[in-house]
Amino acid sequence: MLIRCPIIDREIDEYDCFETGTVAERIVKVTAPVGIKEIKDAPDFHERCINCPNHKE
């Protein structure tokens, strides 16, 4: 399933969103090869991702 990522303003796969969210929650290191690099490089990425309405707990 695709969802809209407000950080990069485009649709991404739900799995990529989840993986990037684990980086935002600091479960996985930012340098790990998971998640979308474009999102991880965005300003205030951690806070913006965690506060996103698509972020799953």
Image: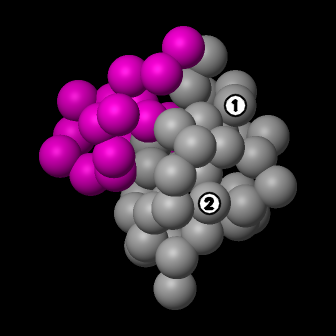
Identity of the residue drawn at 45% across and 50% down: 20
User: Residue drawn at (59%, 51%), measured in percent from left and top?
Assistant: 5
- Location of the C terminus (image quadrant): bottom right
- Residue extending farthest to the left is 33
Graded by Cα atoms within 10 Å as few (under 14), some (14 to 19) or many (20 or more), the crowding at tag 2 reads: some
Question: Along the horizontal axis of the image, is 6 left or right of 2?
Answer: right
Neighbours of disc 1 within 10 Å: few (<14), some (14-19), many (20+) = some
Q: Residue 54: horizontal and vertical position, in percent?
A: 73, 61
Q: How many marks?
A: 2
Q: What residue lies at 38% left-to-right and 22% top-to-bottom?
A: 41
The three-letter amino acid code for the residue at tag 1 is: Arg
Report, in whole angstroms, how far the alpha carbon at label 1 lies from the one at label 2: 14 Å
**Residue bearing mark 1:** 48
- Residue 7, position in %: x, y? 59, 36
Residue 14 visible? The answer is: yes
Residue beneath disc 2: 4
Q: Is residue 29 visible?
A: no
Picture layout, residue 9 above or below residue 16: above
Q: Which residues are magenta?
A: 26-43
